[in-house]
């Protein structure tokens, strides 16, 4: 899949990794609840980025990036919980959190490019 920018690329790559982790947690660790939560929010980041890029106006763009950022925060919670409950080792958790932090930084940077006054005028 070709991505047009870095946040598309990173969020898609993160989603692929999350799907693979989900499969592992379900098939090998027999964990069915927390893994679904991580799958949902971990893949939602990229889906919201795609929706933001395809949005009809700056307000749509901003709103979808805000949702993607919230999903990233939720994913961080589930990763930490899976680590704390011994489903992830320290290396795996740190690797996921590092990737997530980079993506979240990019989301914030993209949101900051929009001027708050422009957003207010759109309402």
Image (cartoon, rainbow, N blue to C red):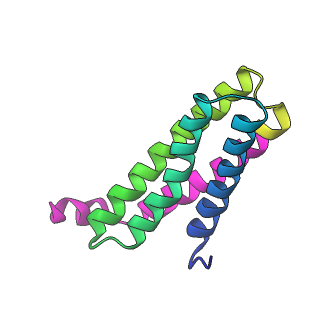
**Residue 107 in picture, x, y percent from top left:** 51, 57
**What residue span does the magenta drawing correspond to?**
94-123
Tell me the residue at 24%/66% (across/down).
118
Is residue 95 shown above or below 36?
below
Near-viewer residue (120 or 51): 51
Q: Residue at left 58%, top 44%?
A: 39
Total marks placed: 0
Is the magenta region chiefly helix, strand or loop? helix
Q: Residue at x 27, y 72 (%)?
A: 57
Residue at the spot 54% in from the left edge and 35% down from the top edge: 37
Above or below: residue 24 compared with residue 53: above
Residue 68 to residue 80: above or below: below
Is residue 68 part of the magenta span, yes or no? no
Q: Looking at the rendering, in which quadrant would you find the N terminus?
A: bottom right
Closer to us: 121 or 31: 31
Q: Is 118 inside the magenta-drawn segment? A: yes
Q: In the figure, residue 55 lies in which quadrant?
A: bottom left
Residue at the outermost top position: 85
From this view, report whether residue 70 is shown above or below residue 16: above
Position of 114 with respect to 19 (left or right) is left
Q: Quadrant of residue 122?
A: bottom left
User: Residue 29: x, y in percent?
Assistant: 76, 30
Where is residue 25? Give x, y as percent.
72, 36
Residue 23 position in % (x across, y down): 70, 44
Query: Image check: 77 left or right of 65?
Result: right
The C terminus lies in which quarter of the figure? bottom left
Closest to the observer, 76 or 26: 26
Q: Quarter-wise, where is residue 116 in the image?
A: bottom left
Indicate left or right for 57 with 7 as reference.
left
């Amino acid at each position: 899949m070709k991505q047009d920018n870095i946040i598309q690329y990173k969020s898609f790559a993160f989603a692929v990794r999350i799907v693979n982790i989900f499969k592992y947690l379900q098939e090998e660790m027999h964990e069915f609840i927390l893994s679904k939560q991580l799958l949902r929010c971990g893949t939602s980041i990229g889906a919201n980025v795609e929706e933001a890029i395809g949005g009809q106006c700056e307000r749509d763009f901003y709103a979808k990036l805000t949702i993607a950022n919230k999903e990233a925060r939720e994913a961080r919670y589930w990763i930490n919980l899976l680590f704390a409950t011994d489903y992830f080792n320290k290396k795996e958790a740190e690797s996921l959190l590092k990737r997530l932090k980079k993506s979240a930084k990019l989301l914030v940077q993209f949101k900051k490019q929009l001027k708050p006054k422009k957003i207010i005028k759109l309402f």
